Image (tube, helix red, strand yellow):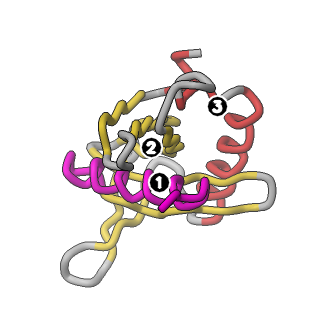
Amino acid sequence: MRMTAKQVGNYGEAVAEKYLKKRFWRIVSRNYNVRGGEIDIIAYRFGVLAFVEVKTRSNDLYGKPSDAVDGEKLAKIRRAARHFCEAYGVGSAIRLPNRLGGDTRTKIYKKRIDVIEIYLSKDKKTEKINHIKDWEKQL
């Protein structure tokens, strides 16, 4: 059965979340939406708050997945990231839930936008994951 673009996107985001968790990232939010912007995954690890855009493809017919993260898409991610930081009081620290059910205020030394490319094989299994850190510096 053929997957819709939405299903492929959701699958890619689930794969990216699992990938990040395996590397000790804490998922702060998924599919954070505001008017004029959206962030697929917001994650925290070792003082870094990453706003992650996930792009999933089964072929390179239209270029690499990261090619879709252009200036316009970055502006939307930045807008949503600013909103998130203002709404949740994220400046130099963020509140993360701890194992005891409370919150722990954790330092943020860097905020960045990452792109995770998910490549799928013909049978829709994950073939390759490419995590591009600090995407804006790559442009």
Mark 3 or mark 2, which is nearer to you? Answer: 3
Give the distance between the C-alpha atoms of the residues marked 3 and 2, in whole angstroms. Answer: 19 Å
Mark 3 highlights which residue? Answer: 68
The spot of residue 99 in percent (x, y) is 19, 76
Which residue is painted at 59% across and 15% down in the image? 139
Q: Which mark is residue 50?
A: 2
Which residue is painted at 31% across and 68% down in the image? 104
Give the distance between the C-alpha atoms of the residues marked 2 and 1, in whole angstroms. Answer: 6 Å
Q: What residue span does the magenta drawing correspond to?
A: 1-25
Relative depth, front residue between 35 and 94: 35
Q: In the figure, 50 relative to 29: above or below?
A: above
> Marks 2 and 1: CB-CB under 8 Å?
yes
Disc 2 crowd rating (10 Å Cα; few below 14, some 14-19, many 20+) is: many
Kind of residue at disc 2: Ala
Which residue is painted at 33% across and 36% down in the image? 129
> Marks 1 and 3: CB-CB under 8 Å?
no
Mark sitting earlier along the chain (2/1):
1
Mark 1 highlights which residue? Answer: 42
Relative depth, front residue between 76 and 122: 122
Say whether residue 54 is magenta: no
Which residue is painted at 54% across and 28% down in the image? 66
* The residue positioned farthest toward the right in the image shown: 36
